[in-house]
Image: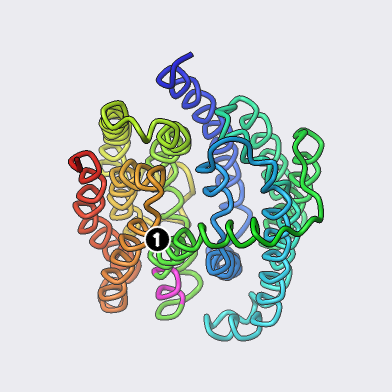
Amino acid sequence: MGYFGQTIKGISWIGGLRGVTRGLAFVRILILARLLTPSQFGLFGVASFMLALVEVFTETGINIFLVQREGKIDNYLSSAWIISIFRGFIIFTVILVSAPFASSLFNAQDALGLLILIAFVPLVRGFINPAVVLYQKELSFHKEFYFKATVLSFEVVVSVILAYLLRSPAGLILGLIASAILEVFLSFLLIKSRPTFKFERMRFVEVLHTGKWVTISTIFNYLYQNVDDMVVVRFLNTTSLGFYQMAYKLAMLPITEVADVVGRVTFPVYARISGDKKRLKKAFYKTIAANLILSSPVVIVFIIFPNQIVLLILGEKWLGAVPAFQVLVFFGLARAVTSPATVLLLALKRQDVVAKISLGTFLLMALTIIPFVTIWGIFGAGLSSVLASVIMIPFAYYFSLRYFSDK
C-alpha cells in the first residue's frame, strides 16, 4: 500500500479513535457539568494548569525524536525510558513543593489538596514504555486505536464514577492516576520492544540535544495556550475560569480534532517522504484543503447557535460561558489552519522554526491579554488568543513554503 493509502487508512483509524474518545469526553462533560459546579471546575483547572506547566518546562521531545529517527529505535528505548522516569520524579517533586505557593498565587486555597494529588499523575506516567511510539512510527494506527481507546475509556468511566461518589474534582484526578497505571501495564504487556534500566551516555545526550528545540517550542506554545487561564483566575475568579475552560473545551473539541487527527497521521508520513519535494508539496496542499473543508461547517454552526449549543450540552447554569465560546470558535479555526504548516516543519526537523513561531504567538498574546480581560472579561481572554493566532498564520506558512522554493 502506498503512502496515500496508508495516510487515508491512518486517518480513518485515528479519526475513529478521536471519535470514540471525544464521544466519551463529551458524555463525561455532560455528566460532570451537572455533578460539579463552575467553581469546582475552576479548582480542577488550577491543578491541571500546574501539572501541564511543569510538564511543559521539562518536555524532552522523546516521541518526536524517535519518530524522526531513521531505522529501528530499539537501541534508544532504554535511554528514553530513563529520561522519562527521571522527568516524572522531577515533576512530582516540583508540584509538591510549589503547591502551597500556587494555591496562594491563584487565590484558590481549596486547590491545595488537588495539587498534591495531581502530582502523582506524572510520577506514574514516567514508567510508560516509550516503545508505544512505534504505533505511530510504523503507521500501525489500528493498534494505537485499541491501545488508546482502552486507556481513555477506563479514565472516563473511573472519573465519572468517582466524581459522582465524591462530588469533588478529586474524582477527575483519581481517574487520571488510574488510567496512567493501566497505560504503564498495557505498554509492557502489548509491545514486544521493551526498555531496561541501562544508561548509555551517548544516546542519552543525543536524545536530549535533539529535543531541545521541541522543549523550547512546547514551552512557548503552552504559555500561549494557557496564559489566558492564568490571567482569568488571577484578575477574575475560579468561577470565571470554570466558565472559560469549559467554553474552550467545547469550542476546541470538534474543530481542532480534524487538525489533530490529520496532523498525527501525516507527521510520520511527511518524515518518510521529506526528501521528495514534489510528493511532499502535493501531500501538504491536500492536508490544508482537508482541514478547511472539514472545519468550516462546524465553525458556521457554532457562530450561528452559540447559546443553543451551550444550553443543550452543558445546561442553563453554564450560559455564562457563551461570550468566551463565541470568540474561541475562531481560535479553534486558526489552530486548524496553522496545524499543517507546523506538522510539516517538524517532519523537516525544523523544530527551531516552530519554536520561534510559538514564541512570537506567545509574545503577541502577552501584550493584549491583561488589558483585554480587564475590559471584556472572559470574552477578552478569548479575543486575545484569536488575535495572536491569526497574526502568526502568515509567518508559519512563509517558513513552510520556503522549503519548496529552495533549490
Q: Does the magenta stretch include residue 349?
A: no
Q: Where is residue 203 in the image (x, y as percent from the top left)?
A: 64, 56
Q: Is residue 367 visible?
A: yes
Observer-nearest of 385 and 61 = 61
Question: Element type at marker 1?
Answer: helix
Reply above or below: 366 against 325.
below
**Location of mark 1 (residue):** 320
Q: Is 90 displayed left or right of 272 in the figure?
A: right
Looking at the rendering, the stretch of residues picked out in magenta corresponds to 228-233
Q: In this view, does 273 lie above or below 186?
A: above
Residue at 35% x, 53% y is 325
Where's the C terminus, which quadrant? top left
Residue at image position (47%, 43%) is 313
Counting from the top left corner in percent of width and height, residue 50 is at 58, 71
Residue at horizontal 68%, vertical 38%? 153
Q: Where is residue 107 in the image (x, y as percent from the top left)?
A: 54, 83
- Above or below, 78 against 53 in this view is above
Q: Can residue 297 be seen in this view?
A: no
Q: What residue is shown at x 48% (from left), y 49% (from top)?
A: 315
Q: Quadrant of residue 201?
A: bottom right
Residue 293 is drawn in which quadrant? top left
Q: Main secondary structure of the magenta part?
A: helix
Amino acid on which the number 1 mark rests in the picture? Gly
Residue sitting nearer the eye, 110 or 286: 286
- Is 395 situated left or right of 333 in this image? left
Query: In this picture, is 25 found above or below 243?
Result: above
102 or 56, nearer to the observer = 56
Q: Where is residue 206 in the image (x, y as percent from the top left)?
A: 58, 58
